[in-house]
Image (spheres, rainbow, N blue to C red):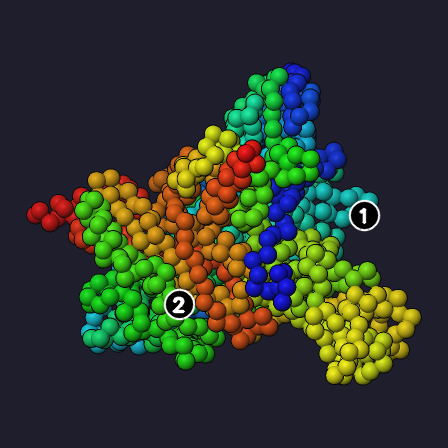
Amino acid sequence: MTDMSIGRAVKRTEDLRFITGKGHYLDDFSRPHQTYAAFVRSPHAHAEIKKINKTKALKVPGVVAVLTGDELAADKIGTLICGWVIKGKDGSPHKAPPHPALATKKVRYVGDHVAVVIGETLDAAKDGAEAVEVEYRTLPAAVDTASAHKPGQPQLHAEAPNNLCYDWEIGDRAKVDAAFSGAAHAVKLQFVNNRLVPNAIEPRAALADYDTGSGEFTLYTTSQNPHVARLVLSAFIGIAPEHKLRVIAPDVGGGFGSKIFIYAEETVALWAARKIGRPVKWTAERSESFVSDAHGRDHVTTAELATDKDGKFLAMRVNTVANLGAYLSTFASAVPTYLYATLLAGQYKTPLIYCDVQGVFTNTTPVDAYRGAGRPEATYVVERLVEEMAAKLKIAPDELRRRNFVQANEFPYTTPVIHQYDCGDFQRAQREALRVADVAGFAQRKADAKKRGKLRGLGYSSYIEACGIAPSAAVGSLGGGVGLWESATIRFNPTGNVSIHVGTHSHGQSHQTTFAQVVADRLGVPFESVEIVEGDTARTPFGMGTYGSRSAAVGLSAVSKAADKIVEKGKKIAGHLLEAAPQDIEFRDGKFRVMGTDKEVGIAQVAFAAYVPHNYPKDLEPGFEETAFYDPLNFSFPAGTHVAEVEIDPETGTTEIVNYSAVDDFGTIINPMIVEGQVHGGIVQGVGQALLEGAVYDADGQLASGSYMDYTMPRADNVPSFKVETIVVPSPLNPLGVKGCGEAGAIAAPAAVMNAVHDALRAVGVDKVEMPATPHRVWSAIRNAKKKAAK
Amino acid sequence: MDVNVSLTVNGKKVTGKAEPRTLLVQFLRETLGLTGTHVGCDTSQCGACVVHIDGVSVKSCTILAVQCEGKKVTTIEGLAKDGKLHPMQQAFHENHGLQCGFCTPGMIMSAVDLAKRNPKPSETEVREWLEGNICRCTGYHNIVKAIMAGAQASHDLKG
Ligand code: FES
Ligand code: FES
């Protein structure tokens, strides 16, 4: 083991360029003779386009072209797609109305794309966009999630009557209903899972180029998955044949899901670049990001839990209306179904679960996967129910959880909602969390707070998530249109250093460091001589990218498999060099050795021999490069317990998070420093959802929270420092035993914080506060409870 | 319409053309090619664009290039001296104070200013100072740690 091995807190090799201002983000790129794109966006939530008049815009100095949806359609550019087909209760596929990159007849949300203006400068393009005259006939808008599919609402798409995309279910309704009618206790909750705007700090951007000589397109874009972007843009949207399209995603400034999807802007930029014969660059302004990046969450849910007299869970029944926005984004349909309801068992042995979900269209920005994607929503349902049940039964909430946990000796465990959990130790994670959070001292802290006039509350979230969606065949059987494997090429260079080409993409996850750790560890080469190459379809094997915490569980498994192949081939070469049979060669710490002897040769020498094969096995191919594709056997299941402690000032309604502790099981840890960083970031996004953030539409469909002036991003003084620990139960299902850590914080935190808020407020008679629990909401809830008590 | 602007950027005298409406951040990125200073918003809220003007941290999206005539501007590219990282840069590296790195130049430039004013800031003081800088990745935990360590190291260096 060296200081750079698996398990060590190796400092990041990507840092140097970022801390010296030498990163290469999208907007830092330029192409000779490039032009700039500005989009004309709909100011209305719902309207017919009567006429688009370009005349004035074309007269603006520096305007090169004004292009509309009719021209896009005339050039046979396809519409944007959704890659996952959900089948409803009656077996029919979901409704996926056309989603043109530039609207033709109707606009369906504020920010919908109407035209693009190409200018010699950005200012010329923007001035031109201002001058495009669009005549609209405005229509009433359907905005509200809960009622969008009810009769009498304005209709978005002729293809989707009652704005219903699908009505889907999982579980056995009759059995669940029967269990409820015989149950000793039941609780029922109704709540909103608030709509969020992802807000990666680097805005989305695209720079498209078309080479008339070779017929090749190059697209620089802020993507989490460049190969997926290429596939969709070629196979479905029809911009270019796949082999003539190169997609490059350089340094990307955060994604959180929002940069998975294939959007209108990059589609239009590629098309326009060919049309005008010059490169086209577009970078979102933040106000555009707010209306055009796919949003997250937005559920309205009714959830019930039934127990026997001792608090043993008998059944769960859930109904959710999920707002999908105006059109189906790339993976939108799967998020509130297979990524949500399949996690409703949580860490518990609830034997019967039924959930049905109505996915609805509204005149709002499309909604898709955002950090956690379905799992924060599921965790919120389960953990709020458990906490309310504990309060009802007057059982300590940690104790009620223990009574129902799947036990460490019960894995593999199959839930009533599809998943088979491979391993875990929920009880141990909880035990450690109780220690880290000093739950034993809470009563005293609460009493002290009371003396200061503050309400103190403690809340748990014992979450489970499913990472690294897989295997591909299972995804396909549930309607997914893609394979979800990963790929890696390990290429030794003749001088002994190593390039690793992977299909994942790092936009903050630190692959350059952690992937090199794994390779250095597995192949015994110096950490410094390993280079990670990703984010360019011309330089990497086909890969599915980074989302759903899959890079370690799926991507590193591919790397590991490729390393096995390298060792296998190396044994043959070393055997030849050492005059021994390959099966008598062992590999350790970078050396091939004849077993039981001190005859050995280093891996760098073996690499050299493979490229200069003068003394080389007769029937072996030269070269020292191996590629592996890895399709996982199952999802991985990170889980843990988070404990939030809050203090509420009843006079102002302000909630302060005074302690936050997390104990997570991510399986094998490659780099604890980086894992902790991922947890911190996730927690703060979860705290943001619980206390601060919410995308708000008015009744006309205008986004009222469309900038950092009105959408409350968590800032440094909104959160404390965190206590983060891990337990390690390695996954038996992948070579490294890893599970994934990217989303846990965002999944666990909303429930932990809101359970703490409800715990604090129970003392003053408040039984419900919605997210975000803003000071105004908390203060109003306290006041209303007082009024009620006075009556 | 273009006017000439002359100023000192990272110790070098430069002159460039700017429209009266050109923001300093645009001038730095597009005219001078100093792309280390980032743009994360259009309402002067995120702090990705923080630079120093005459030694004081300023959001470069809130000031016009022409207003900087004759001033001394330092950007993230000018912070390391003679190939040696500034203690604050080093502290961000040591404490894993960055993930995607997009907010980082602004964070570091802002933190260097804080360290000058307050060589031993408390956690609360650091968090309050960062009011004008948004990070979506790190949850601030390690940024706060980095700034406390970086302030201390800057102080020690000066002796
Ligand atoms: S770019 Fe956001 S504050 Fe300057
Ligand atoms: S490191 Fe990504 S925004 Fe701060």
Q: Position of residue A459 (x, y in %)?
A: 30, 58
Q: Position of residue A759 (x, y in %)?
A: 24, 56
What residue does disc 2 label? A429
In the rendered view, tell whether residue A514 sits above or below residue A693: below
Q: Secondary structure at mark 2?
A: helix
Amino acid found under the numbered disc labelled 2: Ala
Task: Name the residue rendered at 53%, 48% in the picture.
Answer: B95
**In the image, residue A769 above or below residue A179:** above
Q: Is residue A19 visible?
A: yes
The verdict on a common chain for dots 2 and 1 is yes
Mark 1 Cα shell of 10 Å, populated few (<14), some (14-19), many (≥20): few
Please identify the quarter of the rendering in which residue A707 is found: top left
Residue at 44% x, 78% y is: A411
Distance in Å between CA atoms under marks 2 and 1: 57 Å
Within-10-Å neighbours for mark 2: few <14, some 14–19, many 20+: many
Residue placed at 59% from the left, 53% from the top?
A11
Mark 2 and mark 1 lie on one chain; the one further toward the N terminus is: 1
Residue A501 appears anywhere in the view: no
Please name the residue that numbered disc 1 is placed on. A214
User: Subunit of mark 2?
Assistant: A
Q: Which amino acid type is shown beneath numbered disc 1?
A: Ser
Q: Position of residue A69 (x, y in %)?
A: 59, 41
Specify the label residue A743 is tagged with.
none
Q: Quadrant of the N terminus of chain A?
A: bottom right
Residue at position x 73%, y 47% from top? A217
In this view, the residue farthest toward the left is A791
Under circle 1, the secondary element is: loop
